[in-house]
Amino acid sequence: MSEVKFIQDLKEKGKLAPDQAQFFEVNIREIFGDDRTFRAGTISTVAEKTAFGYVRGFLEKKNVKMRKAEIERRASVITGVKRSTGQHPGGIVVVPGYKDIYDVTPVQYPADDITSSWRTTHFDYHSFEDNLFKLDVLGHDDPTMIRFLMDYVKEHPKDFPFSEATDIPMDDPKVYKLLNSTEVIGLTNDDLESKVASFGIPEMGTSFVRDMLADSRPQTFADVVKISGLSHGTDVWLNNAKSLVTGSNSKFGKIPFRICWKQLCT
């Protein structure tokens, strides 16, 4: 039961203070061991636009003129160069007992601070994420929002048809209408500057996902699951599924969103 309580506490970490969040990280080290747990390192590189800025800034400083093609060539050489190292906000790498961390990657102290309680993997964790177990100790906003909701429900019990979080309706049709339009909350598209009213729904409130909702108009839980899958990953929705749903793909035409994507892709 202690493990279950630990996971429940982790899920409410969205509202915990930094020192409380540190408690859970320490707890993980107690479970696996100090010499088996490390912060997942990250490496930031020079972006393409930043590289152009470096080249143009150098030319202005030296008062040198250069053709656009040569500027682009020099910027391309700088793009992707290591700029700084950091650490994943909640990533903790766990090394199995029969291996040593140095079999996989060097480690370092963040910002060369040898007094730090954590050591960080020197290599970017993407380099070995298929070979080592990584925990993501991140806060979940949903349980915190539900907790705040239930606090409000207890203060105003007559305004709600439920008294426990487990009794919250899972198929409220008005919630699905939030994913289709703005009418359910009595506002227009112009009022919200959006075609849907999903701002308060986790994972559904960003401008990117709201555009997806406007194109697909989900009406069932299965549709919402598809949206969640299609909204993650590079070129999963853009330059891919969106053209099929909206009909902008001249080769395949418009395909109804509710068609099983597994059958469509296979």
Image (cartoon, helix red, strand yellow):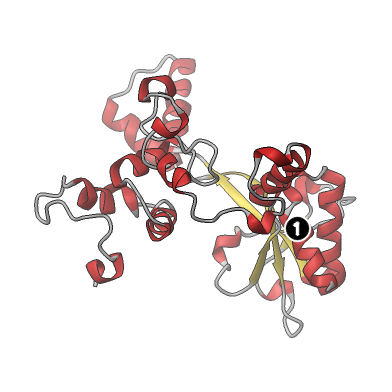
Relative side of 104 to 199, left or right: right
* Residue drawn at the location 75% of the way across and 50% of the way down: 13
Q: Position of residue 209 (x, y in %)?
A: 42, 42
Pick out the residue farthest to the bottom: 98
Judged from the image, the secondary structure of the residue bearing numbered disc 1 is helix
Number of numbered discs overlaid on the protein picture: 1
State which quarter of the image contains the N terminus: bottom right
Relative side of 26 to 55, left or right: right
Q: Position of residue 253 (x, y in %)?
A: 12, 52
Along the viewing direction, whichever of 139 and 160 lies nearer the viewer:
160
> Which residue, given by chain and number where applicable, does mark 1 sit on?
10
Pick out the residue farthest to the left: 251
Mark 1 residue crowding within 10 angstroms, few (<14) / some (14–19) / many (20+): some
Q: Position of residue 206 (x, y in %)?
A: 47, 38
* Residue drawn at the location 33% of the way across and 39% of the way down: 214
Q: Amino acid at mark 1?
A: Leu
- The answer to whether residue 241 is visible is yes
- The answer to which image quadrant residue 96 occupies is bottom right
